[in-house]
Image: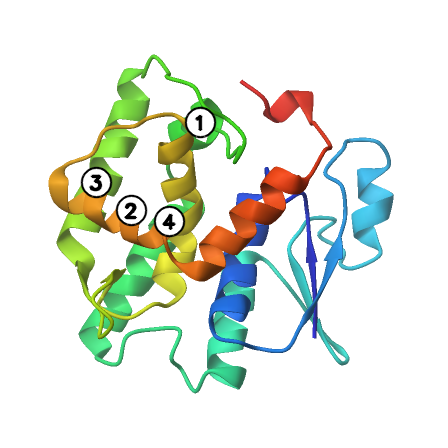
Amino acid sequence: MQLIIGNKNYSSWSLRPWLLLHAHGLDFSEVHESLQKENIQQRLGKYSDSCKVPVLIDEDNIIWDSLSICEYLSENYLVGAGWPESARQRAQARSICAEMHSGFSALRSELPMNCRAVKKMILSAELQNDIQRIDAIWSQYASTDSDGSLRLFGSFGIADCFFAPVAIRFNSYGIVLSEKAAEYQASLLEHLSVVRWIEDALAESEVLPENEI
């Protein structure tokens, strides 16, 4: 399998399926494409008609969109382990992933993912609402995994992958959380695959001014 991704420092969408692949030890190669605006449609259009990253290429199967890729991996390579075992928790996990996938516009615009960033921000009312909602999700659904770490629904899966970029954002911009949510954030940032992504991101030299605060 090949996973087409953007800059690790900036691409929250690329992180999600990469994290699921890496954390579960699946065999894949990375293809890196810069997210610079110049010729981006032509460069990314080589992989899918969406002209966006990430894209998963599995033999003659091309899957784009981070949620679709994670679903495909869970069904075809993880025997469904990307989601919780119980039907109730699967529905809840899918709901919070869909909410993350399509919402939180203030978070995306005001706190762009930037692993190199260290900055305190003035929070708009809209952003504070987004942060409070995420805090509530983490506080409600995080529980202890068999190794003692906190994971959403008690086992590392797609839901954790979808909120990993948020944990990085909150760390970059010094967002203060409630006790349970802060514990979950710290536990997620200590995951070896998240650590590896951040290390790779910090090693990148390309700067995209439109993604800098």
Q: Where is residue 165 in the image (x, y as percent from the top left)?
A: 44, 45
Find the distance from the CA under tag 3 to the CA under tag 2.
Answer: 13 Å
Circle 1 or circle 2, nearest the eye: 2
Q: How crowded is mark 4: few (under 14 residues within 10 Å), some or many (20 or more)?
A: some
Find the distance from the CA under tag 1 to the CA under tag 3.
Answer: 16 Å
Amino acid type shown at disc 3: Asp
Q: Position of residue 22 (x, y in %)?
A: 54, 67
Q: Residue 186 carries which label?
A: 2
Report which residue position mark 3 lands on.
135
Circle 4 or circle 1, nearest the eye: 4
Amino acid type shown at disc 2: Ala
Task: Please name the residue shown 14% across and 53% down the image.
Answer: 140
Q: How crowded is mark 2: few (under 14 residues within 10 Å), some or many (20 or more)?
A: some
The answer to whether the residues at label 2 and label 4 have Cβ atoms under 8 Å apart is yes
Report which residue position mark 4 lands on.
189
**Mark earlier in primary sequence (4, 1):** 1
Find the distance from the CA under tag 4 to the CA under tag 1.
Answer: 17 Å
Report which residue position mark 1 lands on.
111
